[in-house]
Amino acid sequence: MHLSPQMVLAQLMLGLNNGVFYALLSLGLAVIFGLLNIINFAHGALYMLGAFVALLGYTTLGPLLGMPDFHLNYWAALIVAPLVVGLFGILIEKTMLKRLYKVDHLYGLLLTFGLALILEGVFSNYFNVSGTSYNGKPAILSGVVNLGFMFFPTYRLWSIGLSLVVCFGTWYVIERTKLGAYLRAGTENPSLVQAFGVNVPLMVTLTYGYGVALAAFAGVVAAPIYSVSPIMGAETIITVFAVVVIGGMGSIMGSIVTGLSLGMVEGLTKVIYPPAANTVIFFMMILVLLVKPEGLFGKDQ
Amino acid sequence: MNRYLWIVLVLVGLAAPFVFYPVFVMQLLCFALFACAFNLLLGYTGLLSFGHAAFFGGAAYVTGFLVKHAGFTPGLGVLAGTAVAALMGYLFGSLAIRRQGIYFAMITLALAQVVYFVALKAPFTGGEDGLQDVPRGMLFGVIDLGHTYHVAGRPLELNLYYFVFAVFCLGFWLIYRAIHSPFGQVLKAIRENEPRTVSLGYRVDRFKLLAFVLSAALAGLAGSTKSLVFQLASLTDVNWHTSGEVVLMTLLGGLGTVLGPVVGAVTVVTLQSELSAIGSWVTAVIGATFVICVLAFRRGMVGELGKYLKRSL
């Protein structure tokens, strides 16, 4: 097979584009897991919800309010969707997850799985499973840029850059600020942190809210690239679970790096052996389980 | 448990096709066996597999293919499907037991997704259509499973029904024996306190793997039988929704109870067939049942009843 460097670089860029979504989602899962000890199965559904908030804000919100010319534009959606979904997450935490901290952590997984099914079922009822395209992409981000080795869509480049900023911003807050220090301490020993006067239950609620807001943010960024569909989250979340198993959820930077690099591995596979592109991450997971079962950055066993 | 209860249950099973729609009862039996097999793992060993559809659906595809294209008799087809499921169980189990708890669930889910992609893309699975019109054939070369009797004006596929009922009873009995054997006691010990079981000198990983293989094989038995009942092996069988449904059946009926999964399977399958008119709302209803079950009654229906009667069911 002939592999031109251009082709490889192009697929690497597209892979990196998928990778930033894996990174954003696995980062959210890791942040939630750190403090709540549950794996948020609804993460994919909330990512889908974020994309739908952007889509509906653009198409339906105006007519609904009696202002047919009003569109919630892309820039506003980047802020509004994470806020709306974050509040929804806080509601979930306050009313449901909170009751499960004292029982086996598997129940948290089962509860959020149920929530994912509810969201998926409701949206599948109103929207086409094969997807609706989001037309709210700002004019300034359309077109292509010349990267020297290829012409790359401006929006994709923007989505990579913006997501990286958010990922590393989150890393900075958690690893380098006082707020993050509370959070890390809460992960290690919540009762001791509470004894020092930190409101741990509030911290837990806000952490869950932030984690799902990250998922919603990923959804908005993804909306102009992939079509917005009720099952977009379900497909992604299973891959992200494999990413999380490979990276281990012990480290924030680990989640980001694993997400990005697996996206690129997937991109490379598309050039080398296309039929395996869908499953290569799962095979990487098997490999990691055989060689280093606790995950590349794991420290939880 | 009470001997008379068992006799009554077997009689109900024998009489069921004359009262209810036989294909529906067979569907119930297949899913009940699937849920019982799953319960052996989650209810008695404490391992949450989120990929059991891979064994159920994988075996359905193997049986469907062998019976349809390779001329296998139904009995051999079911055996082969079960064997493949057991082998897959061995491979998946060996990988998944390297991690615990939540990771175990995620690993099994991811591995099952590989099986889903194989079923979608492989040349012999029929892609989106699945394997249709799987013949029922002659059991042991003499009993025609496709034969329809006419009893009081109703067409009844009694040969097939009693075959499925026999398969269910065999699987259920195996699980019952496993649970009540010394092996089952070790499994329960692992569920209750794994480090302590290790310190008592048991090789926990071996027990977990054996439980996983047994559970996968029986889930495969259920799937293989299902492919004969519906004459179909499809992507739905290997989809992660199916893995989730079997968790729900077991949870709703009662984790770690002998009869719970049967009750749960009957409830969920009936619910799905009653609600099939409302389309994708069914998914939302299933999800809501999950949420209510996790929040309000984690013991499940049979578990709550057992608590009320103060005995283990």
Image (cartoon, rainbow, N blue to C red):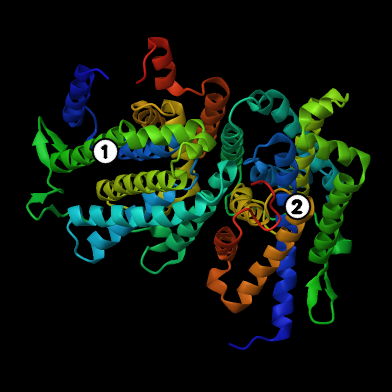
Determine whether, in the image, residue B182 is placed left or right of residue B74: right
What number is the disc on residue A292? none
Quarter occupied by the N terminus of chain A: bottom right
Label 1, label 2: how many angstroms apart (C-alpha)? 46 Å
Location of residue A36 in the rendering, given as x and y in whole percent from the top left corner: 71, 35
Q: Nearer the viewer, residue A264 or A151?
A: A264
Q: Work out whether B259 lies above or below B208.
A: above
Q: Position of residue A92 (x, y in %)?
A: 69, 29
Under mark 1, the amino acid is Leu
Query: Residue under circle 1?
Result: B174
Q: Residue A105 at x, y = what percent?
A: 61, 33
Q: Which mark is residue A24?
A: 2
Asked if residue A110 is positioned above or below residue A270 in the image, the reply reads: above
Residue type at the position of mark 2: Leu
Residue at image coords 36%, 19%? B312
In the rendered image, is residue B134 in sight? no
A100, A118: nearer the viewer: A100
Q: Is residue B177 visible?
A: yes
Chain to which mark 1 belongs: B
Which tag is nearer the camera, tag 1 or tag 2? 1
Image location of residue B174, percent across then percent down: 26, 38
Q: Note whether A201 is above or below A141 in the view shown.
A: above
Residue at mark 1 shares a chain with residue at mark 2? no
The secondary structure type at the circle numbered 2 is: helix
Compare residues B290 and A84 and report the one nearer the observer.
B290
**Secondary structure of residue under mark 1:** helix
Residue placed at 81% from the left, 56% from the top?
A163
Quadrant in which residue B22 is drawn: top left
